[in-house]
Image: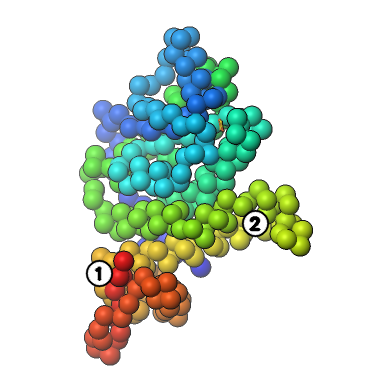
Amino acid sequence: MTESKDNIEPNNKSEVKKDFEPKILGFLCNWCSYAGADLAGVSRLQYPPNIRVIRVMCSGRVDPVFVADALLKGIDGILILGCHLGDCHYGEGNYEAKANYEMLQILLKNIELEKRVELNWVSAAEGTYFSQIVSDFTENIRTMGPSPLSPKNKDFPEKSLISKMEAIKRVVSDGRIRKLVGRERSILNQGNVYEEKVDEDKYANILEEAVQTEYIRNYIYVTLKNNPSSVRDLSRKLKLASSEVLSHILVLRQRGLVNLTTIKDLSPIYIAIE
Ligand code: FES
């Protein structure tokens, strides 16, 4: 079950400042996209200077934790560029990038930040295409305004949004989710040890459910870290049924992440302990 929309009100309604210059972070794979950017440079093609480039050996090297970290630090937009599918110099790195991106999109939709992260493919010969992508993305971000997590945003800091982003960072760091995402290609193409294959729709549903469940669970954890609460308080705050909150608390206790701290007004109060 996903969290109620009422409770995850995005905070990106601030007025767009006319002089707003977006901070864009670009992760470019060394072999194709970075060479494409180089070509744009030597061809003197124009594109906005807002992008700061980090060269990585492969788009598959862009850990979703890097993206979550950058968003938490208030970066307005993130562009991940790799070789076209089938052209990765390490085989299937860009398929890994695609799987990570799809997981991030599921999570970022919860806080309406998904349009601030884009994945695209640029070859070494596509200097013009590179400059077009950077120009279009920068304009889209400019239209959206500063990230709601940026100190430039007049409503900053919005505490619950920061907690939700921290929960997202915890989900993308989670070994179970990473294993599921990392095995996407083999689950779809080779199947399990009994050679039972899962079709794409079914895999997408499994991923969505697993990722959203972990998102809620981690949001409960982060909330308890900031403020020890009862199941009833959490249920009210997250607009979830008490039984659902309790089931997540039980899992978090089994993982050794949450403990009972005291009893208040006959209600157990839980606290995050890591
Ligand atoms: Fe470019 Fe893998 S080497 S995406």
At a point 30% along the width and 43% down the height, the residue shown is: 73
Q: Residue at x 34, y 80 (%)?
A: 232
The image shows residue 59, relative to residue 227, as above or below, that is: above
Residues under numbered marks 2 and 1 in contact, where contact means CB atoms less than 8 Å apart: no
Please tell me the numbered disc located at residue 227.
1
- Please name the colour scheme applied to the rendered image: rainbow
The reply to whether the residue tagged 2 has its Cβ within 8 angstroms of ligand 1 is no
Give the crowd class for mark 2: few <14, some 14-19, many >=20 residues within 10 Å: some
The mark nearer the N terminus, 2 or 1, is 2
Q: Amino acid at mark 2?
A: Tyr
Residue at the bottom extreme? 266
Q: Secondary structure at mark 1?
A: loop
Is 203 on the left or on the right of 118, as rendered? right
Q: On the picture, is 109 further left or further right than 220? A: right
Q: Position of residue 235 (x, y in %)?
A: 37, 75
The Cα atoms of the two marked residues, 2 and 1, are separated by 36 Å
Write the residue at 30% across / 29% down.
21
What is the secondary structure assignment of the residue under circle 2?
helix
Q: How many labels sit on residues?
A: 2
- Residue 72, relative to residue 269: is it above or below? above
Residue with the mark numbered 2: 203
* Residue closest to the eye, 172 or 31: 31
Looking at this view, name the residue that lies furthest to the right.
195
Residue type at mark 1 is Asn
Crowding at dot 1, Cα within 10 Å, few <14 / some 14-19 / many 20+, comes out as few
